[in-house]
Image (cartoon, helix red, strand yellow):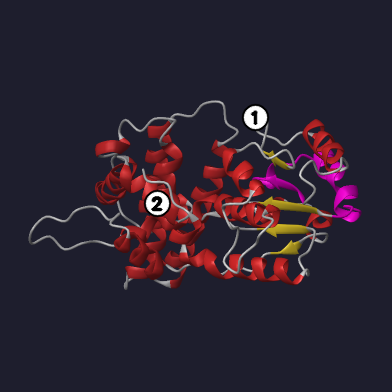
Amino acid sequence: MQAFGLQQLPWLDAPFERFVKERSSGHSAHAQLVSIDQGLGGHILANEMAEAAMCTALTPVGACGHCKSCLLFKAGTHPDCHLIKADGTQIKVDQIRDLCQKLTVTAQQGGQRVAIILNCEQFNLASANALLKTLEEPGNNILIILQTDVPSRLLATIKSRCQQVAFHAPDRKQVYQWLQANQLLPPVSAGEKPHDVTWCLSMIGGPLKLAESLDSNHYQQLIQFRTDWAISIKSGHLSGSLIKVSEHQIVDALNVLYLYLRQYVLKSKELDALAVSNIIGLSSKVAQMCQRLATMASINAPALCQDYILEFRQLIHLK
Protein backbone atom coordinates (compact mmCIF):
# COMPACT_ATOMS: atom_id res chain seq x y z
CA MET A 1 0.00 0.00 0.00
CA GLN A 2 1.51 3.31 -1.04
CA ALA A 3 1.95 6.07 1.54
CA PHE A 4 0.18 9.32 0.78
CA GLY A 5 1.44 12.80 1.46
CA LEU A 6 -0.60 15.95 1.92
CA GLN A 7 -0.04 16.95 -1.71
CA GLN A 8 -1.89 13.80 -2.83
CA LEU A 9 -5.01 14.53 -0.75
CA PRO A 10 -6.72 17.49 -2.46
CA TRP A 11 -9.53 17.77 0.10
CA LEU A 12 -6.92 18.84 2.68
CA ASP A 13 -5.55 21.70 0.55
CA ALA A 14 -7.94 24.37 1.84
CA PRO A 15 -7.56 23.71 5.60
CA PHE A 16 -3.77 23.50 5.33
CA GLU A 17 -3.48 26.66 3.22
CA ARG A 18 -5.69 28.47 5.73
CA PHE A 19 -3.47 27.34 8.61
CA VAL A 20 -0.26 28.43 6.85
CA LYS A 21 -1.77 31.81 6.08
CA GLU A 22 -2.77 32.27 9.73
CA ARG A 23 0.70 31.28 10.90
CA SER A 24 2.32 33.70 8.47
CA SER A 25 0.10 36.55 9.65
CA GLY A 26 0.64 35.75 13.33
CA HIS A 27 -3.05 35.10 13.95
CA SER A 28 -2.98 31.35 14.50
CA ALA A 29 -4.75 29.99 17.59
CA HIS A 30 -2.60 28.18 20.16
CA ALA A 31 -4.87 25.09 20.05
CA GLN A 32 -6.17 23.60 16.80
CA LEU A 33 -8.82 20.90 16.68
CA VAL A 34 -8.55 18.72 13.57
CA SER A 35 -11.89 16.89 13.46
CA ILE A 36 -10.86 14.85 10.44
CA ASP A 37 -10.83 11.05 10.48
CA GLN A 38 -7.47 9.41 9.90
CA GLY A 39 -9.14 7.67 6.95
CA LEU A 40 -9.45 11.13 5.39
CA GLY A 41 -5.88 12.08 6.29
CA GLY A 42 -6.42 13.64 9.72
CA HIS A 43 -3.11 12.31 11.02
CA ILE A 44 -1.31 13.54 7.91
CA LEU A 45 -2.78 17.04 8.21
CA ALA A 46 -1.93 17.29 11.92
CA ASN A 47 1.67 16.27 11.18
CA GLU A 48 2.02 18.78 8.32
CA MET A 49 0.59 21.56 10.49
CA ALA A 50 3.13 20.76 13.20
CA GLU A 51 6.02 20.80 10.73
CA ALA A 52 4.87 24.14 9.29
CA ALA A 53 4.57 25.61 12.78
CA MET A 54 8.12 24.59 13.68
CA CYS A 55 9.73 25.67 10.41
CA THR A 56 11.97 28.72 10.76
CA ALA A 57 11.59 29.66 7.08
CA LEU A 58 7.90 29.09 6.47
CA THR A 59 6.83 29.41 2.83
CA PRO A 60 3.35 30.21 1.43
CA VAL A 61 2.87 26.48 0.81
CA GLY A 62 4.12 25.18 4.15
CA ALA A 63 7.41 24.13 5.75
CA CYS A 64 10.56 24.82 3.75
CA GLY A 65 11.88 21.31 4.34
CA HIS A 66 15.50 22.48 4.55
CA CYS A 67 16.00 24.45 7.76
CA LYS A 68 17.43 22.73 10.83
CA SER A 69 14.00 22.54 12.44
CA CYS A 70 12.50 20.83 9.38
CA LEU A 71 15.36 18.33 9.19
CA LEU A 72 14.98 17.44 12.87
CA PHE A 73 11.22 17.13 12.46
CA LYS A 74 11.49 14.82 9.45
CA ALA A 75 13.99 12.67 11.33
CA GLY A 76 11.57 12.42 14.25
CA THR A 77 14.16 13.88 16.63
CA HIS A 78 12.96 17.45 17.13
CA PRO A 79 13.27 18.05 20.89
CA ASP A 80 10.44 20.60 20.94
CA CYS A 81 7.84 18.42 19.21
CA HIS A 82 5.85 16.02 21.33
CA LEU A 83 3.60 13.30 19.93
CA ILE A 84 0.86 11.75 22.07
CA LYS A 85 -1.07 8.62 21.12
CA ALA A 86 -3.23 6.28 23.15
CA ASP A 87 -1.46 3.93 25.53
CA GLY A 88 -3.60 0.87 24.83
CA THR A 89 -7.19 2.02 24.47
CA GLN A 90 -6.86 5.37 26.28
CA ILE A 91 -4.76 8.50 26.46
CA LYS A 92 -3.84 8.39 30.12
CA VAL A 93 -3.51 11.19 32.63
CA ASP A 94 0.22 10.56 33.19
CA GLN A 95 0.86 11.06 29.48
CA ILE A 96 -0.85 14.45 29.55
CA ARG A 97 0.78 15.55 32.79
CA ASP A 98 4.18 14.69 31.33
CA LEU A 99 3.32 16.59 28.14
CA CYS A 100 2.19 19.68 30.03
CA GLN A 101 5.42 19.65 32.03
CA LYS A 102 7.51 19.44 28.85
CA LEU A 103 5.62 22.37 27.33
CA THR A 104 6.72 24.58 30.23
CA VAL A 105 10.41 24.02 29.43
CA THR A 106 12.17 26.59 27.23
CA ALA A 107 12.34 25.45 23.60
CA GLN A 108 15.73 23.86 22.90
CA GLN A 109 15.72 25.21 19.34
CA GLY A 110 14.47 28.61 20.43
CA GLY A 111 11.23 28.42 18.45
CA GLN A 112 7.85 26.76 18.86
CA ARG A 113 6.99 24.02 21.28
CA VAL A 114 4.41 21.81 19.56
CA ALA A 115 2.24 18.97 20.80
CA ILE A 116 0.39 16.62 18.44
CA ILE A 117 -2.33 14.58 20.12
CA LEU A 118 -3.74 11.94 17.78
CA ASN A 119 -7.18 10.40 18.24
CA CYS A 120 -7.88 12.60 21.22
CA GLU A 121 -11.36 11.06 21.54
CA GLN A 122 -9.41 8.45 23.51
CA PHE A 123 -8.91 10.86 26.41
CA ASN A 124 -10.35 9.57 29.64
CA LEU A 125 -11.92 12.10 31.99
CA ALA A 126 -8.76 12.57 34.02
CA SER A 127 -6.47 13.12 31.03
CA ALA A 128 -8.93 15.52 29.38
CA ASN A 129 -9.16 17.58 32.55
CA ALA A 130 -5.37 17.54 32.94
CA LEU A 131 -5.02 19.26 29.57
CA LEU A 132 -7.56 22.01 30.29
CA LYS A 133 -5.24 24.32 32.25
CA THR A 134 -2.62 24.24 29.48
CA LEU A 135 -5.31 24.94 26.89
CA GLU A 136 -6.51 27.90 28.96
CA GLU A 137 -3.04 29.31 29.74
CA PRO A 138 -0.65 27.82 27.17
CA GLY A 139 2.22 30.27 27.48
CA ASN A 140 4.11 31.78 24.57
CA ASN A 141 5.19 29.92 21.43
CA ILE A 142 3.12 26.84 22.16
CA LEU A 143 0.88 25.08 19.66
CA ILE A 144 -1.32 22.11 20.57
CA ILE A 145 -2.83 20.17 17.67
CA LEU A 146 -5.59 17.76 18.60
CA GLN A 147 -6.81 15.30 15.97
CA THR A 148 -9.96 13.25 16.43
CA ASP A 149 -11.89 10.65 14.48
CA VAL A 150 -14.95 11.08 16.73
CA PRO A 151 -15.43 14.73 17.78
CA SER A 152 -18.72 13.89 19.52
CA ARG A 153 -16.73 12.04 22.21
CA LEU A 154 -14.74 15.12 23.22
CA LEU A 155 -15.63 17.17 26.28
CA ALA A 156 -17.29 20.48 25.45
CA THR A 157 -14.66 22.19 27.61
CA ILE A 158 -11.92 20.83 25.32
CA LYS A 159 -13.73 21.87 22.13
CA SER A 160 -14.44 25.38 23.38
CA ARG A 161 -10.75 26.07 24.00
CA CYS A 162 -9.65 25.09 20.49
CA GLN A 163 -9.99 26.60 17.06
CA GLN A 164 -11.89 24.17 14.89
CA VAL A 165 -10.13 23.50 11.59
CA ALA A 166 -12.75 24.05 8.90
CA PHE A 167 -13.07 21.11 6.52
CA HIS A 168 -15.36 19.79 3.80
CA ALA A 169 -15.14 16.05 3.24
CA PRO A 170 -15.04 14.83 -0.37
CA ASP A 171 -18.23 13.28 -1.68
CA ARG A 172 -18.37 9.81 -3.22
CA LYS A 173 -17.85 11.13 -6.74
CA GLN A 174 -14.72 13.01 -5.69
CA VAL A 175 -13.39 9.95 -3.88
CA TYR A 176 -13.98 7.77 -6.95
CA GLN A 177 -12.16 10.31 -9.14
CA TRP A 178 -9.27 10.35 -6.64
CA LEU A 179 -9.04 6.56 -6.66
CA GLN A 180 -9.11 6.60 -10.44
CA ALA A 181 -6.43 9.30 -10.71
CA ASN A 182 -4.13 7.34 -8.40
CA GLN A 183 -4.80 4.06 -10.24
CA LEU A 184 -6.24 2.45 -7.13
CA LEU A 185 -9.40 0.99 -8.66
CA PRO A 186 -9.54 -2.78 -9.15
CA PRO A 187 -8.87 -3.97 -12.72
CA VAL A 188 -11.88 -4.61 -14.93
CA SER A 189 -12.00 -7.52 -17.36
CA ALA A 190 -12.80 -6.92 -21.02
CA GLY A 191 -16.52 -6.36 -21.47
CA GLU A 192 -17.08 -6.01 -17.72
CA LYS A 193 -18.72 -2.85 -16.44
CA PRO A 194 -16.80 -1.16 -13.59
CA HIS A 195 -18.77 -0.81 -10.38
CA ASP A 196 -18.65 2.02 -7.87
CA VAL A 197 -16.37 0.88 -5.06
CA THR A 198 -17.45 3.83 -2.90
CA TRP A 199 -20.66 2.02 -1.86
CA CYS A 200 -18.89 0.97 1.36
CA LEU A 201 -17.13 4.28 2.05
CA SER A 202 -19.22 5.18 5.11
CA MET A 203 -18.49 1.88 6.89
CA ILE A 204 -14.79 1.82 6.02
CA GLY A 205 -14.11 5.34 7.28
CA GLY A 206 -12.63 7.36 4.42
CA PRO A 207 -10.79 7.21 1.10
CA LEU A 208 -7.42 6.22 2.60
CA LYS A 209 -8.95 3.23 4.35
CA LEU A 210 -10.88 2.35 1.20
CA ALA A 211 -7.63 2.47 -0.78
CA GLU A 212 -6.05 0.15 1.80
CA SER A 213 -9.04 -2.19 1.58
CA LEU A 214 -8.82 -2.30 -2.23
CA ASP A 215 -5.11 -3.12 -1.99
CA SER A 216 -5.82 -6.20 0.13
CA ASN A 217 -8.46 -8.94 0.00
CA HIS A 218 -10.61 -7.01 2.47
CA TYR A 219 -12.69 -5.28 -0.20
CA GLN A 220 -13.42 -8.58 -1.95
CA GLN A 221 -14.62 -9.94 1.39
CA LEU A 222 -17.08 -7.04 1.70
CA ILE A 223 -18.36 -7.70 -1.82
CA GLN A 224 -18.82 -11.37 -0.93
CA PHE A 225 -20.77 -10.44 2.21
CA ARG A 226 -23.05 -8.20 0.15
CA THR A 227 -23.72 -10.97 -2.37
CA ASP A 228 -24.34 -13.55 0.34
CA TRP A 229 -26.71 -11.30 2.30
CA ALA A 230 -28.85 -10.88 -0.84
CA ILE A 231 -28.92 -14.64 -1.46
CA SER A 232 -29.58 -15.47 2.20
CA ILE A 233 -32.42 -13.00 2.58
CA LYS A 234 -34.06 -14.36 -0.56
CA SER A 235 -33.75 -17.99 0.54
CA GLY A 236 -34.21 -17.54 4.28
CA HIS A 237 -31.03 -19.50 5.05
CA LEU A 238 -27.40 -18.52 5.52
CA SER A 239 -25.37 -18.70 2.33
CA GLY A 240 -21.69 -18.64 1.37
CA SER A 241 -19.38 -16.64 3.60
CA LEU A 242 -22.11 -16.03 6.20
CA ILE A 243 -22.23 -19.72 7.13
CA LYS A 244 -18.74 -19.58 8.59
CA VAL A 245 -18.48 -15.88 9.46
CA SER A 246 -16.07 -15.46 12.39
CA GLU A 247 -16.16 -13.19 15.42
CA HIS A 248 -13.37 -11.24 13.75
CA GLN A 249 -15.48 -10.67 10.62
CA ILE A 250 -18.92 -10.14 12.14
CA VAL A 251 -18.72 -6.35 12.44
CA ASP A 252 -17.84 -6.05 8.74
CA ALA A 253 -20.63 -8.46 7.85
CA LEU A 254 -23.21 -6.52 9.85
CA ASN A 255 -22.03 -3.18 8.51
CA VAL A 256 -22.59 -4.56 5.01
CA LEU A 257 -26.06 -5.72 6.07
CA TYR A 258 -26.82 -2.23 7.36
CA LEU A 259 -25.91 -0.72 3.98
CA TYR A 260 -27.84 -3.46 2.16
CA LEU A 261 -31.01 -2.76 4.14
CA ARG A 262 -30.75 0.97 3.47
CA GLN A 263 -30.32 0.35 -0.25
CA TYR A 264 -33.20 -2.14 -0.21
CA VAL A 265 -35.52 0.57 1.07
CA LEU A 266 -34.34 3.04 -1.56
CA LYS A 267 -34.66 0.61 -4.48
CA SER A 268 -37.87 -1.27 -3.58
CA LYS A 269 -40.94 0.31 -5.14
CA GLU A 270 -43.53 -2.01 -3.63
CA LEU A 271 -42.91 -1.44 0.08
CA ASP A 272 -45.61 0.35 2.05
CA ALA A 273 -44.81 2.99 4.66
CA LEU A 274 -44.98 0.52 7.55
CA ALA A 275 -42.56 -1.92 5.89
CA VAL A 276 -40.15 0.92 5.12
CA SER A 277 -40.27 2.05 8.74
CA ASN A 278 -39.73 -1.49 10.00
CA ILE A 279 -36.73 -2.13 7.75
CA ILE A 280 -35.14 1.18 8.73
CA GLY A 281 -35.74 0.16 12.34
CA LEU A 282 -34.00 -3.15 11.71
CA SER A 283 -31.04 -1.39 10.10
CA SER A 284 -30.73 0.80 13.20
CA LYS A 285 -30.83 -2.33 15.36
CA VAL A 286 -27.98 -3.80 13.29
CA ALA A 287 -25.93 -0.60 13.67
CA GLN A 288 -26.43 -0.66 17.45
CA MET A 289 -25.29 -4.28 17.57
CA CYS A 290 -22.09 -3.33 15.73
CA GLN A 291 -21.33 -0.87 18.53
CA ARG A 292 -22.11 -3.41 21.24
CA LEU A 293 -19.90 -6.09 19.68
CA ALA A 294 -16.82 -4.05 20.60
CA THR A 295 -17.43 -4.85 24.28
CA MET A 296 -18.87 -8.38 24.01
CA ALA A 297 -16.61 -11.25 25.06
CA SER A 298 -17.92 -13.74 22.48
CA ILE A 299 -20.73 -14.14 19.98
CA ASN A 300 -22.19 -16.90 17.82
CA ALA A 301 -21.75 -14.93 14.61
CA PRO A 302 -23.61 -17.21 12.16
CA ALA A 303 -26.57 -17.51 14.54
CA LEU A 304 -26.76 -13.73 14.85
CA CYS A 305 -26.77 -13.40 11.04
CA GLN A 306 -29.55 -16.00 10.76
CA ASP A 307 -31.65 -14.10 13.32
CA TYR A 308 -31.46 -10.93 11.21
CA ILE A 309 -32.40 -12.83 8.05
CA LEU A 310 -35.52 -14.27 9.72
CA GLU A 311 -36.48 -10.92 11.21
CA PHE A 312 -36.17 -9.20 7.83
CA ARG A 313 -38.31 -11.81 6.10
CA GLN A 314 -40.98 -11.44 8.78
CA LEU A 315 -41.03 -7.69 8.25
CA ILE A 316 -41.82 -8.08 4.54
CA HIS A 317 -44.03 -11.14 5.10
CA LEU A 318 -41.81 -13.71 3.39
CA LYS A 319 -42.35 -17.32 4.50
Question: Helix, strand, or loop for circle 1?
Answer: loop
Where is the N terminus found, in terms of image quarters? top left
The CA span between labels 1 and 2 is 25 Å
Q: Is residue 185 visible?
A: yes
Q: Residue 104 vs residue 10: left or right?
A: right
Q: Which of 15 and 113 is in front in this view?
A: 113
**Amino acid type at mark 2:** Leu
Q: Which residue is disc 2 drawn over?
A: 210
Expressed as whole percent of the image width and height from the top left, the position of residue 59 reads: 61, 65
**Amino acid type at mark 1:** Gly
Q: As drawn, which residue projects farthest toward the top? A: 297
25 within the magenta span: no
Q: How crowded is the residue under tag 2: few (<14 C-alpha within 10 Å), some, or many (20+)? A: many
Q: How crowded is the residue under tag 1: few (<14 C-alpha within 10 Å), some, or many (20+)? A: few
Give the residues in magenta: 112-140
Q: As drawn, which residue projects farthest toward the left? A: 190
Q: As drawn, which residue projects farthest toward the front? A: 67
Expressed as whole percent of the image width and height from the top left, the position of residue 182 reads: 32, 58
The answer to which of marks 1 and 2 sits earlier in the sequence is: 1
